[in-house]
Amino acid sequence: MAERILKNIRIGGLKNAVKGNDYRKEATISYGILIGGYILLQILTAAGLIGHNLQGQFVPICVYISLAVSLNLVVGISGELSLGHAGFMAVGAFSGILMSRILLQSMSFEPAILIISMLFGALMASIAGFIIGIPILGLRGDYLAIVTLAFGEIIRNFMNVLYFGFVDGKLRFAFNHTIEGIEDTDRIITGAIGATGTKTMASFTWGLLLCLFTVFIVLNLKNSKQGRAIMSIRDNRIAGESIGLDVRKYKLMAFVVSAALAGMAGCLFGLNYSTLVPIKFNFNTSVLVLVFVVLGGVGNMWGGIIAATLLTILPETFRQFADYRMLTYAIVLILVMIGTYNPAIKSRVNALFSKIKPKKKKDDGKVKKKKSGKEGA
Amino acid sequence: MADKKDKREELIDIDISDSGHAYENRQEIYYNDNVGGRAVFVDSKEQYDPDEPYNDQVYIPEKDRDKAPILEVKGLGIDFGGLTAVDNFNLTLGRTEIGGLIGPNGAGKTTIFNMLTKVYEPTRGEIFFDGKSTKGMNTVDINKAGMARTFQNIRLFDKLTVEENIKVALHHTTNYGLIDGMLHTPKYRHEEFRIRKEAMKYLKIFGMTKTADYRAGSLPYGAQRRLEIMRALATKPKLLLLDEPAAGMNPSETSELMETIKEIRDRFQIGIFLIEHDMSLVMGICEGIVVLNYGRTIAKGSAKDIQSNPKVIEAYLGKSRGKMDEEEKAEDLEEALSKGKLESAPSGKPDRKEGE
């Protein structure tokens, strides 16, 4: 190593600088929350403190966590707004159910069927993501959001006219009309009625494994050359191109991986219910997942995990207000956006917090000082 | 325009009568007016005739003359709608030359950079980078071919750390696939360790090891400029384009930057082409300087040539009304000559014509 060209940057110049993302910390917190939450809920269930209704929400919570984390890959890491996440979930759900029904004819080992179905769901969803992604990823910002919304609805409407079933042990499919000579018990997917007669295989443990896998993939991807490329294109597209990054390729990569993970989650969701209607995967579900992401903090994985959990448990606990759920979401979203992006409100909130805890211990004071310094930057 | 034409006809009439006299007269008026004349702004279209070829574009510093030039640009031009932003830009840049591109505001300097890196597709002309035409290439291909740039308004990946900014630039030399990236296989760990070391090497050269873990967007201005140059260098270019590297720097920072640029050239043995308004930097380190005005090259040469070139002085300081008239006279004289209206050329051409 030859001599240095320049004098070292003075430390004083860095007093306003902010440290970057700590991947190890983020991963530890995310896995910690997931495993800790799992253990806690298992103990509470064993102690009989959790009602039957809420127990039924365990798998959906896990599915929503996976969806939130996978959508965060597009919204937080790739920086594009996607409103069609439920569409990929639907593709994963129905193709997973289909695969499980086919496998059930020759196999009886459920975990293997579940894993293969989930992988198949992920594959189909990623293909859907790829096909949709190619034409639309030249768009940016609002336009991309609008088109993803439209594609999400297209997928759902496609499911509405799709018929799958066995006739004499052979798989048949049709569009927009029932399959001739089919027995009721051999129907797999029946248009708008959806998937019926699904053998439920999902469990809370599978849900946890799905969450861990999703978080593992997304966090690993974030801290890899592909993730860095995706994030740098988000931060500055022109500079990204100038250092030789193919913008479309990496946007598509984020989109497809996200779709695949959503498909996997969708598959577990589908295998949790004996009946599943396509209307479940409408625009509201896409927005719901987006709310988890925004509420947890865009790009913040563990924030999304907590938001998904709370926003699934709370409506269940306050069932009587369930009709106002979407309204509450809108209000919460607006408040979060105002609170996090408005400097005046932010500083007022900070001032309030410093008043509530004026002086406690020496250590606390130090931490507070450091924090306020950072926020000032 | 009509006014100009009238003048022309008038002049031709005069010139035909006595060529020698006209020439002498011209010299006299030129000097007289240049001393006492008042600088005025003139319209670009009147100042330079688009048909007038620019000949003196192949200046390369002596040390690079035995090597093939890294960049050759022929007749480059771009129109935005009806506006011709750059027209007939020519350049030959030596393999390890530090070239400068100067010109008044709005002369089209950054537009040229954008055309070289294919942010804009040129309307006319050809660019040969490292002997190959860049026709049909996009920005990404250009970078892969070995041209890296910085931006006038800093463009960093703000939310990534300093180290990550350089690692992104090392993207194409990092050798693992998506599956390795998602599962963090041993191959991933090996490669990440290698590029981390490499990124640190760049940070060490630029004295920024302490900043490695900080977000690029939160660094002080000077450090951001350094980082942008580092990031461009990390893509292992053969030619580095710097768009106003000294903008916003104080004199001591600028002189530090001059040393850095020289050191980069010596250490990496690459060509550097920079846009700069700071004349102390340009005249201090640039071996070849191109001067641009209203989208047209008006001169290329060493710092010494440029400083004494009347066209350059004119571009920066404006020119006198009298001188403008005289130039038209000279043009008309040539026109007249080519039409064969004059029997013999005036003896001895004025020195200043050589720069054109």
Image (cartoon, rainbow, N blue to C red):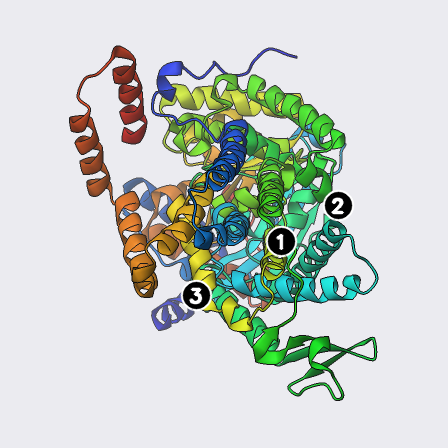
Which is more toward the observer, B205 or A277?
A277
Please name the residue shown 30% across and 48% down the image: A336
Image x and y of residue B63, in percent: 69, 26
Whole-angstrom CA distance, mark 1 to mark 3, is: 23 Å
**Residue B356 at least partly seen:** no
The answer to whether dots 1 and 2 both sit on one chain is no
Q: Regarding mark 2 in the picture, which secondary structure is present there?
A: loop
In primary-sequence order, the first of circles 1 and 3 is 1
Q: Regarding mark 3 in the picture, which secondary structure is present there?
A: helix
Residue beneath disc 3: A284
Which image quarter holds the C terminus of chain A?
top left
| Camera-side mark, 1 or 3 | 1
**Residue A289 at least partly seen:** yes
Image x and y of residue A24, in percent: 54, 27
Which is more toward the observer, B294 or A334?
A334
Which is more toward the observer, A167 or A280?
A167
- At label 2, the amino acid type is Gly
Please name the residue shown 38% across and 21% down the image: A14
